[in-house]
Amino acid sequence: MIDKVLLKNEVERLDIMLDDTALERFDTFAEMLIDWNSRINLTAITDPFEIVYKHFADSMLALAAVNVPQGASFIDVGTGGGFPGLPLLIARPDLHGVMLDSTLKKLMFVDHVLNRLELNSNGRTLHMRAEEAGIKVQLRNRFDFCFSRAVANLRELSEYCLPFVKVGGTFVALKSAKAQEEIDGAKEAIKILGGEITEVKQFFLSDMGERNLIIIKKVSPTPPKYPRASAKIAKEPLGLPKTK
């Protein structure tokens, strides 16, 4: 299926080491992704070469961008077909992860992968909208890390993600090129939500283009009124002057 040597070599450039078990799990994951994608819409990326770069190596950039301690907890907001959460658990089965999404069919696939790869003891899915999950006592301020490849603008994404992160924890947003405009527009909102952008790390994955990982430290608790309902998040972007 996938070129396991290619994957191994690419992530070694990021100082991430994959053993034979991890490589076999990635191969099985790719097979399952292509199989299930023929029945439900999980991804537009189905070429094995592109899966290596655009799904697997790309997801593991999160491990290259921040120091993730042994046994750390994370939540993957808007996981879709399991990205970046599943690759993180395959590469680091010591971690404890929750994959959150509002589309049940996609989470059924993620659950199937967790079971097949025997990662269900340290990974689970959660079928819920992010703004609903973020106000739950058992989820709020709970995680060491939040990771997200969701396509939402950083300002809105921060309101969805930062409530999950404990003070001292980190939110990492995986973005493509030209992230600076989003960063500039989100700084005030991130401050309101208790976060602070500490670094933006730039990566290039061979011919797959530029990736920017925005690293946001949780420096104070998120005020209780956030996250708001999604309609309000869209209508009244946080940190911008209210329109009359």
Image: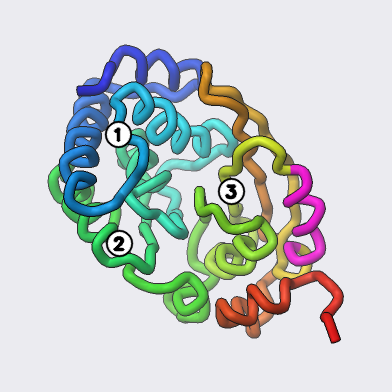
Mark 1 or 2, nearer chain start: 1
Mark 1 or 3, nearer chain start: 1
Residue at position x 23%, y 53% in the image: 40
Mark 1 crowd level (few <14, some 14–19, many ≥20, 10 Å Cα): some
Left or right: 77 as drawn, with respect to 223: left
Depicted 63 relative to depicted 148: above or below: above
Depicted 199 relative to depicted 128: above or below: above
Q: What is the quadrant of residue 51 in the picture?
A: top left
- Stretch in magenta: 180-190
Residue at position x 56%, y 77% in the image: 230
Image coords of residue 179 (percent x, y): 70, 43
| Three-letter residue code for mark 3 | Val
Element carrying mark 2? strand
Q: Residue furthest left?
A: 116
Q: Main secondary structure of the magenta part?
A: helix
Which of the two residues, 106 or 166, is positioned nearer the viewer here?
106
Image coords of residue 94 (percent x, y): 34, 42
- Residue, disc 2: 125
